[in-house]
Image (tube, rainbow, N blue to C red):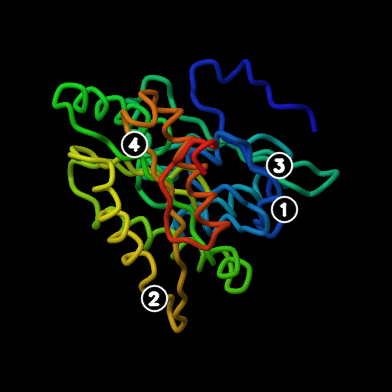
Amino acid sequence: MDPLNLALFHEMIPLEMCILNADLTILYANAPLTRSTGIHDFSGRSMHSLIPKARLGTLQVLLEKARIEKKEVRYTAEGLIAEEDREVILRHNPETNNFYVVLLRHACEPVRENLDALTGLPTRETFMERAEQLLQQGRRTKTKIAFVFMDLNGFKPVNDTHGHKAGDVVLRVIADRLQDTIRQTDILARFGGDEFVMGLSDLKAGIHASLSVRRLMKAVVQPIDIEKLQVSVSGSFGVAIYPDDSKDIKTLIRYADEAMYRAKTAGLGYAFFAPPDEL
């Protein structure tokens, strides 16, 4: 198949694309589609997991139209990805019997807050913006901020044993529990996969973050009901403190990630960042 003429799309953003086989199984998804959906592993997934059920009938009809008529088919789908409209471009490759699906957003449309499509939480980009606001507040009030990096334990077995839909349920439930546990003045984001990052504000001392982390740990380990199944996961948490450990957001998140890894490998629930010479 000839490559899509990207010059035609200069008035539209962003260019999200996937390749489907005849059974609507996703064979490939590019980075923009990964970011907008919050799904980081498309292997074995169907379009059923990506778009609303009500849209599938139209998609199937138009894919068949593109195959039979051997031409590009375009249509507009409302609320397709994260409740945002997309113009959809469909092309069929007769050599492989696969379909190219390109999703476009008009450049003139307002850009909504960057939210993770699966959990509804802010993404990494939005978190970084809000974290800068937290740091400004901390400087004004001379208070500390704890950056908490959490990675789920036991998520992969759930995903592998019960399927992607079960894994998606777990991620949504955990996201809701984290959001319900932190305060309104704190911030939370999904950084990708089963990783979540939080910013806990207005702390008198860094050690006070341990109380919040223990509440988060307790919330995460509660059983999760998925139809007739009940599964359990836990979290490993790492904590870095502003301004004690660093005054730079990216460095603080990296330190919290390192502390999380240390907690996970040591079988601990959580750990605070410590320089290598203090370990």
Residue 211 in picture, x, y percent from top left? 25, 56
Mark 4 vs mark 1, foreground winner is: 4
SS type, badge 4? strand
Question: Taking the image as drawn, is residue 117 in sight?
Answer: no
Pointer 1 residue: 21
Q: Which residue is drawn at 32% across and 67% down?
A: 218
* Label 3–label 2 contact, CB within 8 A: no
Q: Nearer the viewer, mark 4 or mark 3?
A: 4
Numbered tag placed on residue 241 in the rendering: 4
Q: Which residue lies furthest to the bottom in this view?
A: 228
Image side of residue 141 versus residue 9, left or right:
left
Residue at the image position 47 percent from the left and 68 percent from the top: 233
Packing grade of label 1 (10 A; few <14, some 14-19, many >=20) is: some
Determine contact: label 4, label 1, CB under 8 Å. Answer: no
On the image, which quarter does residue 148 sit in?
top left
Question: Looking at the rendering, in which quadrant would you find the N terminus?
Answer: top right
65 lies above or below 72: below
Point out the frontmost of discs 1 and 3. 1
Residue linked to disc 3: 69
Above or below, comparing residue 8 to residue 36 in the picture: above
